[in-house]
Image: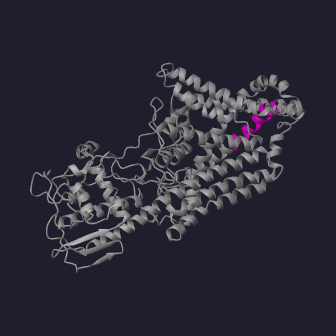
Amino acid sequence: MPKSLDAPHRLSNLSDVPMSHLLSGLDPAIAPDIVRKPTNGPSTPPASPSKPSSEDGNQLSSNPISGDEEEDYDNLEIDPNTVVEDGAGAGIHRADAPANLVIDPTVVLEPTSRKGEYVLTADDPAIREILENRIQIEHGAKVSEKERTRLRDLVFTRQFTRFDRQNPASGSPFHGFFTLFWLGIGLLLIRVAMQNWKQYGSVLGPAEILHMMFKRDLIVLGLTDGVMTAGTAMGLVLQKLIRRGYLTWNGSGWIIQNMWQMFYLFAVIGWTWYREWPWTHTIFIVLHGLVFVMKQHSYAFYNGHLSQVHRRRAIVAQKLARLDDIPPSSSPTGEPRSRALSSPASADPFTSALDHPPHSPSQRRASVNPKASTDLRSENTEVSNIALAIESGRPLDAKQLRTFRMILQSELSDLDTELRGKCTHSYNHYPSNLTLANWADWICLPTLVYELEYPRQESINWWYVLEKTLATFGVIWVMIIISQHFIYPPVMTAVTLRNSGVSLKHRWPELPWVLSDMLFPLLLEQLLTWYVIWECCLNVLAEVTRFADRGFYGDWWNSVSWDQYARDWNRPVHNFLLRHVYHSSISALRLSKKEATLVTFLLSALVHELVMFCLFRKVRGYLFILQLSQLPLAELSRTKLLKGRDILGNLVFWFGLFVGPSLVTSLYLIV
């Protein structure tokens, strides 16, 4: 149980005191009510520094901020808590209960020396947590990241990709350059075909890469991908076991999930080594395996979080039902020195807060209790009376029981909202979402962040699916031709030098020539690879699944810094890292903004280097270093040298994107 106050003079930890009279002295006239926006969040294992699996975050948008603004990764503020005054509500009257009534093994009514008065003793962690949060709220303290396990959802909206013909922006004044690009690609293919015919007597030329792709294990490759897809169902099985009570997510569930993900990834990599596949097969399987690992992680951690919410709801509902049997004492335990009421009608503002919560942020901020004191012993507020009752064992009166009941009702309402999320259909609520159909749908969706429900289109345009499918195979064919004609020769030259026993001292002089030979074709391959995945393949999946949010990328070509490029060129992965790595590092490991950013980039760099290891079968760290160099480059973009100079920043960005791939590839080949 976390400590309730951070101050030199603090209330005794509620887990260390006898839980007598849990709500003594809480007058509903000024009882604080939490008015929260519906928030749902994934992925929280036990929020403990010793278990860095808990995940936290705030409301994220699938549309990151514009390029000229710095993204505030540390913007984790939840809407301010609210104190609603001048409300009105009817009292709640309960029949008397017999003496020595046992409500629960952890909640017991004990008679006092005075007739008609009882002592409510409880040692319930769920109730203690609610009380501690209320104490923090009363004194303006933020609920710590450890307690804030409700994560805000990504905001999914209906949108199209930038180059999609359905996007109104596709008819921009620069659309002609898009046409010119593809015209140039077509003329380049004609020129390559003519040269191949002249030199080899075939428009395809020697076609080594084509033979490499289709010569062996094509069926095994497809079967492997199918087994990988089926293996992701392990997450569904685990969540079913958790739902039925065989496991708990906070216990062994999150550990089993992480161990399975590690086994899954290394099994995929080991299989590519065992089969001795060419780089074409290897890169496809490894990248697809990484996608499946991210999908499994998001699915498991989101539903694991909801399983804990569901368990908490059951506990609170049980306590609320049994609270009705508790008889009130005959006299109040204390009166505050002042009240915030302006009329006698404000008998029960808690009910008023539930029925008429303020909506605007300014209204919510204005209603927050301004107290900043953290020494409860020097006060005479209603929350301090609760704390004093806990320490002294004084009886509970009727209005204290009534307010406690409403606190539990508010908690139940909040938990129900969490379990519903933004669903428009009840069959998507947790735990109804734990079905084979929901899992299969999730695996096919072009996103890496699991939600209970996404915006969908009304129907499937099969002509659009055909268009994007043909574009996919067409672009892949163009990439094969460019690789064969412009990249394969210098690569084989470098490989021959290394395999022939030439020393590194004599191989180094070839580096500039290999780099320059691959400079333009590798940039073109990089652009085409991005286009075929993020514009063609993901749009096909989106149309088939009727997934309406197609913001798979932003205007990354206008980037003026490397951090802007990192969040715009691949938004599915960016959103995954932001929710499941960055915010998780803050909530579980208690890292600062800069430290969490470093962890996120470090993990990304390690994964990129892992791909290079699978591709070249050796560890050199070149791509790892270049990936981490984005951090100082991002800081450089905020200095006086580059800040506000968008053209210069964009020039630096494009120079790095132009030279980087060729430099990395040349280093792996030569050294």
- Per the picture, the main secondary structure of the magenta-coloured stretch is helix
User: In the rendered image of this protein, does residue 510 appear above or below residue 595?
Assistant: above
The x, y position of residue 167, in whole percent, is 50, 40
Residue placed at 16% from the left, 65% from the top? 90
Say if the magenta span includes residue 100.
Answer: no
User: In the rendered image of this protein, does residue 455 appear above or below residue 67?
Assistant: below
Q: In the image shown, does 308 or 455 lie closer to the viewer?
A: 308
Residue placed at 23% from the left, 54% from the top? 384
The image quarter containing residue 390 is bottom left
Left or right: where 295 falls relative to 153: right
* Figure quadrant of the N terminus: bottom left
The x, y position of residue 582, in whole percent, is 51, 44
Residue 31 can be seen, yes or no: no
Region in magenta: 473-490
Say if the magenta span includes residue 489.
Answer: yes
The x, y position of residue 145, in whole percent, is 41, 49
The image quarter containing residue 649 is top right
* Figure quadrant of the C terminus: top right
User: In the rendered image of this protein, does residue 613 appear above or below residue 89?
Assistant: above
The x, y position of residue 102, in whole percent, is 30, 77
Residue placed at 17% from the left, 60% from the top? 348
